[in-house]
Amino acid sequence: MIYLDYSATTPVNDEVLESFVKCNKDFIGNPNSLHKLGNDSLNLINSATDQIKKLLNINNFDVIYTSGASEANNLALKGIIDLYSNRGNKIITSSLEHSSIYKPLEYLKNKGFEIYYAPLNADGTVNLEELDKLIDDNTILVTISAVNSETGVLQPIDEIGKIINKYPKCYFHTDITQAIGKINLKLENVDLASFSSHKFYGLKGVGALLKKDKIIIEPLIHGGKSTTNYRSGTPALPLIVSTAKALRLALVDLDNKYTHISSLNADLRTFFDKYNKVSINSPNNAIRHILNISIDGVKPESFLHALEKYNIYISTKSACSSSNSKSDAVFAITNSIERANSSLRISLSYLTTKEEIEEFKRVFDICYNELTNLR
């Protein structure tokens, strides 16, 4: 099997899985219990949380554990708006966001909030001057993802945060799901950030919202005591511990991992250049883990399943996107309906080998010739 869909989800690291199993077996106490077993579990959670803060250099943040990035995104957006709606009714986002951003924004729009889209440069990055002009005293939230999940567009998050810092009534949220564990992140000018563990070789079903500790938000889930006041429920100790372990391992030797992935990405870009019906949609500044292409006249599902016959796996769009719609992210960058309707996403990992890429290229050529000759 050749797996090239790492942006959808990653295989769990064996060491992470071992930590999860060991924690389940050795720490059976509820972290909210007052007895020794409960204290032992609570101390382990606190240790994992401290490790995450240290790894991300966010000592002035709360770590609110969630079921994943979708919940964290909902908590960030609705949590800010519910508490600070008296400050204004304007929210700014981009046309390169995940569905777990757009859906809560749609919900908030129906509640009377106004949604604005920051203009993009030709390479998909937010136009900083235009963003600055768009923010006013009525703006209470800006939410822009660090990396687009379909095209890999990398946003200048730190620069965006500096602009928003000029507006004390406005908060900045970023979804870092496709960036964390892949690139170095600077979050000092960010107010809230969301992620899922399964994107960096952790387990599914756990993520977090990182929130500056001076900011108060309204919880989505109300109930009893938990790790913070912002998300009730019995703390999922094994998932929390495994998340800290996954993040630590993902950040080990990060520069060399990125160099390896960049080499594979460059090889594929050169390879695709020889096909006159292939267009590369990911701009040059995109994160190297994601390479989005379109094949003129070929349905993306047809090409995906053609590769699948050879036990090679890629995707058409973000795994959470509707399967019957064009890629809005590709359209936002290319302004081409044809390319947006035929996009394919190849996502790489430090686990991807040169031999796998060579086999992918061999099979791609076979599938390309078969499917383009059907026209």
Image (spheres, rainbow, N blue to C red):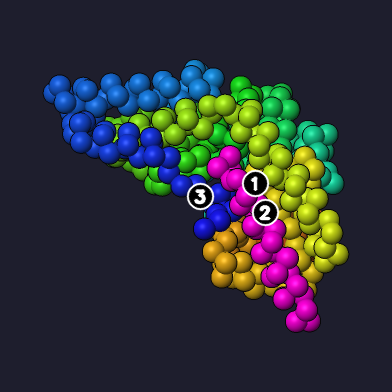
Q: Residue tagged by mark 3?
A: 9
Estimate the spatial distance between the alpha carbons at disc 2 and disc 1, rounded to whole Å.
6 Å
What amino acid type is highlighted by mark number 1?
A: Lys
What amino acid type is highlighted by mark number 3?
A: Thr
**Residue at coordinates 56% horizontally, 49% vertically from top-left?**
6
Q: Residue tagged by mark 1?
A: 354
* Mark number, residue 249: none
Question: Where the C terminus falls, by quadrant?
Answer: bottom right
Mark toward the start of the polypeptide (1 vs 3): 3
Residue farthest bottom in this picture: 374
Estimate the spatial distance between the alpha carbons at disc 2 and disc 3, rounded to whole Å.
22 Å
Residues in magenta? 346-375
**Residue at coordinates 75% horizontally, 62% vertically from top-left?**
294
Estimate the spatial distance between the alpha carbons at disc 1 and disc 3, rounded to whole Å.
21 Å
Q: Position of residue 22 (x, y in %)?
A: 26, 34
Magenta segment includes 362: yes
Mark toward the start of the polypeptide (2 vs 3): 3
Q: Residues within 10 Å of mark 1 (few under 14, many from 20)?
A: some
Residue farthest left in this picture: 35
Q: Position of residue 89 (x, y in %)?
A: 63, 43
Secondary structure at badge 2 equals: helix
What amino acid type is highlighted by mark number 2?
A: Glu
Mostly what secondary structure, the magenta segment? helix
Q: Residue tagged by mark 2?
A: 358
Residue 296 visible in the snapshot: yes
**Residue at coordinates 77% horizontally, 40% vertically from top-left?**
285
Residue 295 to residue 293: above or below: below
Relative depth, front residue between 139 and 175: 175
Residue 169 to residue 298: above or below: above
Quadrant of residue 218 within the rendered picture: top left
